Image (spheres, rainbow, N blue to C red):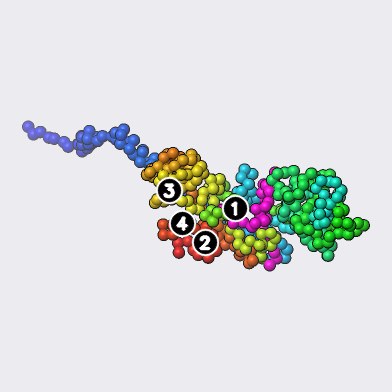
Amino acid sequence: MRLTFSFHPTCSRTRHARRRSVGRRGFTLIELLVVVGILLLLAGMTIAAVNFSLNAEKIRAGSRQVQSFLEGARDRAIHAKEPRGVRFLSDTTNPHACTSMVYIAPSEPWKQGTIRLERQDANSDGVADSAIVLIVRGAGTDWDLLSSNGQIVSGVTRIKLPGDQDGVWYTVSFIDADPNQNNPPVAAAPYELSVANQVLILTIPYRDPGTSATNQVVAFQGGGPSTYLLELAPSELPNAERVELPRGIVLDFDDEDDPNSPHSDLPFAWHELPTGEHPLRLDLMFSPRGTVIGPAASKGLIHFVLLRAEDADNELPADAPRWQPTTSYAVDGWTVPTPRNGYYYRATTAGSSGGAPPTWPTATGATVSDGSVTWLCLESGDKLLVSVFTQTGQISSHPVYETTPADPVAPDPYRYAVRGEVAGQ
């Protein structure tokens, strides 16, 4: 008898598959946790890098925006053959940080009511304190309303006396109940600006000593100037929309005299502007020839610094001293480690540093003890300058110049803008 065997391929593949399946095994819990941990670490590093890149790009976008806006005002002045400008508006929570801009044009001079010129009588006894003529007293002028609306500013606003072709411009100040105003050094009681007391004070004596006796308060008897022109702050152009800077980016207006500070370098006249109840308004005007005019023109070169809002709040220095052992540090003192790691450290507790440097944290907001000093870690973001040459109206953008290992000397933050250099050269 002959036996016959048949071969079934399907059965053979099934047996092999079973053998292979017996040899496979899954991932252990530890392996899965390791993989998840690596993925989270990579994700965190990626997010941090993306955030830093986004902040840097937002600052560059803000720089382009400010430069374009200033150039737009200059072009408008040339095209309209009339002055045009830009008003920088401060943030509602930080008067030293600008967050928006708007186009402006000169306002018509104010000439409502009449005036008379007086000599100062601080104690109101009817006898002039000196022969010089300083007081401009108005009737029906509503100067108090102009002050409350921010249309006139003590120490900045000018008045033309008399208000005709023979008049001369004088800078005026006034005493305001608002302590933020730049009140002149005269007795407040008889000269505080109010509804019932319309008084302005000349910063220099009137050119004519008057016709009355020098001990008389009223300087002119039966004559003298009665008309005037009062220079008002520029007004926003009709239908002009306020333009916001990128979110989280500001123009820093905390102007300081520290040569190592990366703050904006602004016209002196702007230092005198009070905040009052309104956001700070800084006006930059261009003439029909394209040059800067007004109080800002005398500056020569104006530098605006763009940076992150948190950097403006923290007031990070352009260069901080290297950490030193057994050294006294005051609260809000700054230091950086050697070698530098890209972070700044501010003393939140005064004291003396230790004999050896601490392990410096590299997480913003972290603290470290150093002897009896406590340091707070802060990160400095990118900064860019927008510079305006007032005599030509030229506008340019440059990085802020900071120290490098090759150039550790205290820097001039405006070096690139002043010398026309390019970063990295």
Indicate the quadrant where residue 287 lies: bottom right
- Does residue 133 show up magenta in the picture? no
Give SS at disc 2. helix
Residue at image mark 2: 415
- Going from N to C along the chain, the mark reached first, 1 or 3, is 1
**Residue type at numbered disc 1:** Asp
Residue at image mark 4: 403
| Image: magenta residue range | 262-289
How far is disc 3 from disc 4 in space, using C-alphas?
15 Å
How far is disc 2 from disc 1 in space, using C-alphas?
17 Å
> Observer-nearest residue: 293 or 69?
293
Say left or right for 267 vs 150. left
Say left or right for 268 vs 345. right
Label of residue 15 in the image:
none
The extreme right residue here reads 222
Q: Point out residue 72 in the picture as x, y percentages from the top left corner.
A: 64, 60
Query: Can you tell which of label 2 and label 3 is closer to the viewer?
Result: 3
Residue at position x 42%, y 48% from top?
324
Residue at position x 72%, y 44% from top?
178
- Going from N to C along the chain, the mark reached first, 2 or 3, is 3
